[in-house]
Amino acid sequence: MGYYNAPTHFVLTNKRSLMSLTNKTELASLITDIQAIAENKLSPQETHQLAAFFPIYFEETEHADLRRFSSLDLFGAAMAHFEFARKRLPGVQKARIYNPDFERDGWQSTHSVIEIVADDMPFLIDSIAMLLSRHNINLHLLVHPVLSVARNEQGELLSVKRTEDRHLPLESFIHVQIDRVSDAAMLHTLEAELNRIIADIRLVVSDEPRMREQLVVISKDLAKLKGARADEAREAVAFLHWMADNHFLFMGYCDYDLVEREGKDSLRIVKDSGLGILRHQGDKEYSTSFEQLPQSLRELAHQPQLIILNKSQTRSTIHRSAYIDFVGIKRLNDKGEVIGERRYLGLYTARTYHASPKDIPILRNKVMSVIHNCDFVDDSYKAKTLSFVLESYPRDELFEIPAEVLGPIAEGIVSLQERPRVRLFVRTDRYHRYVSCLVYVPRDSFSTEVRLKIEQVLLHAFNGSAAEFSVQIGDGMLARVHYIIRTQSAKLPTFRDSEIEAEIARVVRGWLEELHQLLVEAHGEEVGNALFKRYKGAFPVAYRDDFAARNALLDIQHRKRFRPTFR
């Protein structure tokens, strides 16, 4: 019998459940309604078993969300989830996405439903939200109790309690109602992705202690380096300790041997070294991402730099939607030659983005190197501006950029504060997978339309396949847009920063400002300004849509020839 087959008097109690649930008293009223339905629908034994389940199932759910559902709907959802959770072995997740059907499931909903029963782990909710966002699916209801659950050896559910009972394992019960998805193939795809995400979270959480243990081993190996490499090794060890101090979410680890294969450098996976999301790499014997690089870029693996900080080519499906951070630590032989690499994958935590770069190992050396090379007078305007530029520099960019590249860029940004104008600063990724572009635009000229136009200029200039951006607009006269332009091949097209910058300046200026600039360039500042004042209103919108500003310059010059004297 379906859960909706309830007597008439329960229709009246449903009205009460639709009232504003603004406090625990009203929530208790809703639970009373649900339990009354349970008493009418279930056997006394089942009613007794579920008496403790309903209150703790809904007690942390947003009241504003609950009020949009009747008590009968919520009873059906809770019962379906309870039935789904009746049997589960430890360490085995259960997850499904379905469209509740009254005849099949005993309840129904206008939405599609996600149900999960798993060992309690971090990152579940934000990772589910990311999955829905990638598919442009809206979330309508989230119920997420963490329960103390007793099961027998067969995994059969015996009882559920609040988490105050720490003698029992904790389990996450997650119920999510989302935009209805009717296509069966799409539901299957979503469910497969969901199960992969939960499985990856389990690998990350279970392997984190071993990844941290490996960090200790690596630190001890680095500390053995003497002579010219000692200072670099100490800073590398300090960075690894900093990572371990809750500044890095460890998601994967693997050890590689640097070998020659068919005349090319390759990174061969050290057997059974994979942890976290790198634990199961299928039947792969070599690093796939490294194999895709041309030999000219593979040769970079021989550079003796102890630590490489970079971004991977893969977006995280766990915790935060960002390209996964890559920390590579070189393995050296007694001669100082590179013979392998230990690789961590993960994400820098929020603490990283709020800390000063002067407090982060490796970054602090870059910052001090730039400050020393710029050699501004202590406490001068430029010295203080440089300090601000480095503190506010995009943090992910600061991890990757070499000090010798950062220096000229930082000095150029300092100069901008004295004369605000359009500027472009370009850095290419060491493996040519993307181009990082810092674009500064006068604040008054910046808009969404301008941002999109600049993006198109950059995509065209670098033969880009995709772009991401972040915007910073402070109290100053400039807006900063940081673009990451993903490239389509390891070989970048030939480009000149100055030419791209000039094209960006043109789109930022707009049609009239470009005409003004052209007139000044063609006739000098005094005459150009006078001509602009006379003709700036002479060209209607239809003309500007069909013709470039350079056409207008020619029209003005043509008209000017017939005037013996300009007034």
Image (cartoon, rainbow, N blue to C red):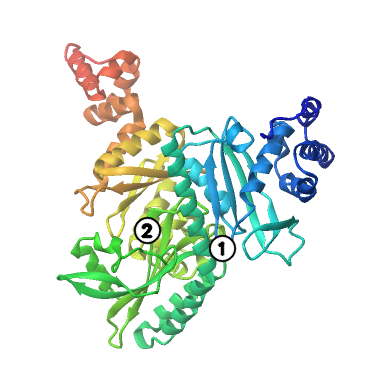
Q: On screen, 248 above or below 260? A: above
| Front one among 250 and 412 | 250
Whether residue 168 appears in this view of the structure is yes
Which quadrant is home to the C terminus?
top left
Name the amino acid, label 1: Gly
Hey, which residue is sitting farthest top in the picture? 562
Q: Secondary structure at mark 2?
A: strand
Q: Nearer the viewer, residue 256 or 486?
A: 256
Residue drawn at (53%, 54%), measured in percent from left and top?
319
Mark 1: secondary structure:
loop
Q: Residue furthest left?
A: 263
Please identify the quarter of the rendering in which residue 30 is found.
top right
Asked if residue 410 lies left or right of residue 565, the reply is right
Q: Is residue 196 above or below residue 212?
A: above
Identify the amino acid type marked 2: Ser
Residue shown at the point (39%, 86%) measured from the top left: 225
- Horizontal and vertical percent for residue 236? 43, 75
User: Which quarter of the rendering shows the N terminus?
Assistant: top right
Residue 249 visible within the image: no
Residue drawn at x 72%, y 33% as measured from the top left: 72
Identify the mark at residue 91; answer none if there is no mark.
Answer: 1
Q: What's the distance in space between the residues labelled 2 and 1, CA to CA?
A: 29 Å
Query: In terms of depth relative to the viewer, which is nearer, 191 or 415?
Result: 191
The image shows residue 208 at horizontal and vertical percentages of 52, 69
In this rendering, is residue 531 above or below 497? above
At label 2, counting other C-alpha atoms closer than 10 Å, the crowd grade (few under 14, some 14-19, many 20 or more) is some
Camera-near label (2 vs 1) is 1
Mark nearer the N terminus (2 vs 1): 1
Label 1 crowd (10 A; few <14 / some 14-19 / many >=20):
few
Residue 8 placement (x, y as % from top left)? 78, 24
What label sits on residue 312 in the rendered view? 2
Left or right, 173 with reference to 136: right
